[in-house]
Structures are given as C-alpha cells and as structure tokens.
Image: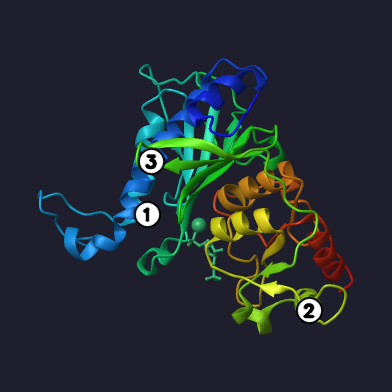
Amino acid sequence: MSRKNQTLGEFIIENQAEFQYSSGELSRLINSIRLAAKVVNHEVNKAGLVDIVGAAGETNIQGEDQQKLDVMANDTFIRTLTNRNILCGIASEENDDFISLEGQNGDNNNKYILLMDPLDGSSNIDVNVSVGTIFSIYRRVTPPGTPVTIEDFLQPGREQVAAGYIVYGTSTMIVYTTGHGVNGFTLNPAIGTFYLSHPNMQFPEMGNIYSVNEGNYVQFPDGVKKYIKYCQEEAEGRPYTSRYIGSLVSDIHRNMIKGGIYMYPKSSKATNGKLRLLYECNPMAFIAEQAGGKASDGYTRILDLKPTELHERVPFFCGSRLMVEKAESFMNND
Ligand code: AHM
Ligand code: MG
C-alpha cells in the first residue's frame, strides 16, 4: 500500500509484483534512473556557479574538462544504465543513432530498451528556469540474444511498459508510471532520498490554463488559431490563463497538477512541430493517459502513431481530457 513519506526505493520494492513477467529488472532499471537523476540534479544545481567552477569547454580546477550540462546528463544516464546489465539498447536525443548494448559474448539477453531526452529545455539553464529528463521504456521485439535493431525502438507508444520524467525545479521530482497510475516523488536534497509526495496523480478533466508559444501564432494552422481565440474569449469560464515556460516537463507537470492544455502544433515553418515522438511525446502521453488526461497530434491518439524514424517530430496536444477534445474539434472542423 503506497503512502506518503514512503521512499522511492520502498515503493519500487512494494510494487514490483505489479509488473507482468516481472523478474525484478524493471525495478532495477527504475532504481538506476533514480541514481542518475540524483547525479544530474547535483550538476544542474551547480549551474549558477559556472563563473566560479568554470563554463563548458573550459578546464576546471582539478584539470578536468567541463562538459555542457546536456552532454553531461546524457553521459550520466548512459553510464548508469549500461553498467547494470538490464538494457539491450538506448536511444537519446543527444545521439544520432541508437546504442546497441552487447554482452560479453557479443550477444545480449536483456529484454528492455530505453529512449530518453536527458536534459530537455536545456537552453533554460542559463536563466535559472527548470529543466527535465524524459524517459520511455519498452520490451524489445527482436529475439533476446541478437543485436537490437531499429524495430525495437520504432514501437507505437501504447507498447510502453514504463515512462517518466524528472523535473529539476524548485524541488526535484521523479514522476513515473508503469501502467498502474502515476506517482510523484520529491527529492530531499539534504539526505539524497526521494519520497512519495504525489501519490496517484490525476490530470483534472478540465482546467483553465493554455500553454503554447504564441509567438508562432501567424504560422499556426487555422484550427489552432481558432482554438487559441476560443481560449481567449469571454464566455463560460473563459478567458483561460496563458502559462508557457518553454520547458516541456515543467509545463506538463504544472498542467497535470492545476489542469490545462499544452500545445506544440505544426506551423508553416515547422511542418511537424518541434517535439520528438519517441522520447518527448510518447512518454508524456503515456503519463497523461495514466493520470486520466489525453494526448493527441490534433487528430490521432499519440500512443497509436506508428513511428518511422528515431528522431521524428509530431504536433503535440496534451493535457486535461476535455480541453484536448475541444482543441481536436477545432482541428477537425477546419
Ligand atoms: P529541446 O529538446 O531542444 O530542449 O527542445 C524542447 C523544448 C521543450 O522543452 C519546450 O516545450 C519547447 O522546446 C519550447 O520550444 P519553443 O522555444 O519553440 O517554444
Ligand atoms: Mg528535448
């Protein structure tokens, strides 16, 4: 039985039985994500001291090269996850191609693959705005013992076995799902422990926040323009409030707690929007649905899209169910 004050470690052990075919690997995987998150959190929190400890590209006082934080986050997650012999492949926003993890004999009997955006919104670091890590986990489709192939990574989002994000914010949180609801854990930085702070998170069915980069307004499709005007109309609980941090994890996290819709539509400049299907939209869509929310590309459920490329982009509408449905109705009538 989950309870507040439970640590993430305790929660993982107690809930292990929920995973179908569980042999403890998925639990160990979540555990290693927890560990990498603490390391990245420590580095992100030092970012403001950059003038003192040295900027990226410089050499620090110990003579070590300073890395850019997104490269550091990528390396930290990859190193932590590969050392534990749980995964057979990793794909990252930071790497052009997926990484095949081979065992000692050149084969690999591990059954999970992971996709991630190790530090989303990293342009916000310079101005002390929250950033995040997003991850998505699948069971491989090719036979164990053979090298992973692109097919293992190009699965529709509905096949995810787990997904989550870490927000490095005013406090650092891990929010994740294994398909049995969504739980959020807050880091106590003094002792380095995550505690269950947000059990069974729920997207309010309806909210009053809309989040979109309105600077792109003139380039949006007509359906999106009309929906934005609808949000701004004075009628029936509207106008809504506009809130856009420009950091996906923080924008979705806030909307899940308060109720709202996040949109990154296509535009005349970016014909598929900006966000990546495999390691930004799919994991967020899985979390949103598990919390009672909804995610679509404006017409189709995100989790039903069949990916064709590792880094493909897709328009994204995610949030409170009734708000996403309303946005879809404007798209469909256009
Ligand atoms: P990134 O992966 O290069 O960091 O970009 C993703 C980020 C999201 O966090 C955010 O929602 C979006 O880009 C903001 O984009 P824009 O500045 O175009 O509004
Ligand atoms: Mg990103």
Is the Cβ of the residue at disc 2 closer than 8 Å to that at disc 3? no
The answer as to whether callout 3 falls within 8 Å of ligand 2 is: no
Tell me where residue 274 sits by quadrant.
bottom right
Can residue 150 be seen here? The reply is: no
Residue at the spot of label 1 = 70
Residue placed at 48% from the left, 24% from the top? 28
The answer as to whether callout 1 falls within 8 Å of ligand 1 is: yes
Mark 2, secondary structure of its residue:
helix
- Viewer-proximal residue among 226 and 181: 181
Residue placed at 18% from the left, 58% from the top? 53
Mark 3, residues whose alpha carbon is within 10 Å: few (<14), some, or many (≥20)? many
Location of the N terminus by quadrant is top right
Specify whether 158 is left or right of 58: right
Q: Which mark is residue 135?
A: none
Precedes in sequence: disc 1 or disc 2: 1
The answer as to whether callout 2 falls within 8 Å of ligand 1 is: no
Give the percent coordinates (x, y) of residue 62. 10, 48
Residue at the spot of label 2 = 222
Give the percent coordinates (x, y) of residue 305. 73, 48
Instruction: Indicate the amino acid at tag 1.
Output: Asp
Mark 1, secondary structure of its residue:
helix
Instruction: Indicate the amino acid at tag 2.
Output: Asp
Instruction: Indicate the amino acid at tag 3.
Output: Lys
Q: CA distance from mark 2 to mark 3?
A: 43 Å
Mark 3, secondary structure of its residue:
helix
Give the percent coordinates (x, y) of residue 135. 53, 43
Q: Nearer the viewer, mark 1 or mark 2?
A: 1
Mark 2, residues whose alpha carbon is within 10 Å: few (<14), some, or many (≥20)? some
Q: Nearer the viewer, mark 2 or mark 3?
A: 3
Residue at the spot of label 3 = 38
Q: CA distance from mark 1 to mark 3?
A: 15 Å
Residue placed at 74% from the left, 73% from the top? 240
